[in-house]
Image (cartoon, grey):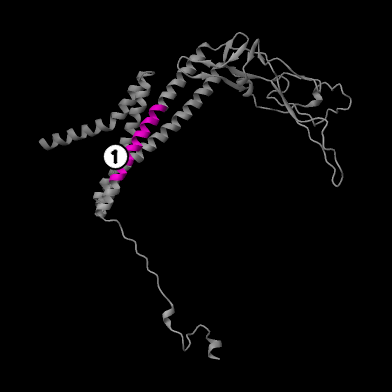
Amino acid sequence: MYRRQYPDAPGPGSSMGDSHTRVSYRRNPNFFERIGNSLVGILVGIALLVVASCLLFWNEGRAVQTAKSLDEGLSIVVSLENIDSLLDPTYNIRVNAVKLRRTVEMYQWVEHESKRSMPVTSQMQTADVVHVGGFELSGGLVGKITDFKKINPSAMSPPSDPKIQMLEGVYYHSHYPLQPQVSIIARQIRHRLLPFQTVAGDVLEMLYTGRLSPKEIFGKEQQQNTFITWGVRFGGWLLMFVGFGCLTSIITTLVDWLPIIRELVAAGVGIMNLAFSISLSLTVIAIGWITYRPLLGMALLAMAATPFIMSKFRSNRMDSRRNV
């Protein structure tokens, strides 16, 4: 009766020694081990600074080269118009387009033997020779045309085959169905448009759907170049900031055992790392722009030197006050 009412109570042959307690212990690194880790961090910080400097210098060289190439292309570009029409003999349809894509679907019977072959298959036709005005486009430029739009088949001439019904089963895709427009930047060689090698080193071969002026096209390319440049700049600066943090980690390690001082030192070191990373990043960026835009490069160098000039000025003022 007692066991039924109290099943968890210890019996005559049981003991409380069945339960146990697990204790884990983790040894904190001592002072010399923390110093050793900080020395490893210094090596990692130096490597990060080298990688960040190389990344920023390469990025500025790429940005300068792209800017020069776009300026060169804009100065010599000539506008052309009038794309030739493209004929689809299967459906007797002629449209002003570079590519014509046909999509075919076949209904299948459920629980019934259906045909395995289709009388008409889906396909995409590309004109063998594509002209802009009197000039032939290269294969690379034709391949860039991928903006397909639907065309209403009822607006086209009916096919010669009476078995073909011009319903919604046939699609003609282009940006402007009845009068497609593309804007191209390329090099004219006789009757062909090919990639253009700039003096700066880049290759210009651009294609945009729609009718755009040369300034609009090069403006879009400049915006893309600016976006990439600033993205890489941010990544390079972040690497430098982390690198300086690794370099100065030994300073915070030395005062880690002082509760109040370590917070003040950590804040000061963080501000110093921020100033150093910004200054070094601006210096590397300025070196890349001095040859192309001297005023911009010199302005960036002045901004990079500002923290050091202000620090020197404050130091001189403090020395003068002490002498007085």
Farthest right residue in view: 162
Q: Is residue 41 magenta?
A: yes
Q: Is residue 122 in view?
A: yes
Q: Secondary structure at mark 1?
A: helix
Q: Residue at x 38, y 22 (%)?
A: 289
120 and 188: which one is in front?
A: 120
Quadrant of the rendered structure where residue 243 is?
A: top left
Q: Residue at x 85, y 38 (%)?
A: 115
70 and 154: which one is in front?
A: 70
Horizontal side, residue 89 vs residue 19: left or right: right
Position of residue 92 relative to residue 306, above or below, is: above
Horizontal side, residue 186 vs residue 97: left or right: left
Q: Position of residue 70 (x, y in %)?
A: 49, 18
Q: Position of residue 59 (x, y in %)?
A: 42, 27
Decide whether the magenta segment is chiefly helix, strand or loop: helix
Badge 1 density bin: few <14, some 14–19, many ≥20, Cα 10 Å: some
Q: Which residues are magenta?
A: 39-58
Q: Amino acid at mark 1?
A: Met
Q: Is residue 67 magenta?
A: no
Q: Is residue 324 in view?
A: no
Farthest left residue in view: 324
Identify residue for label 1.
272
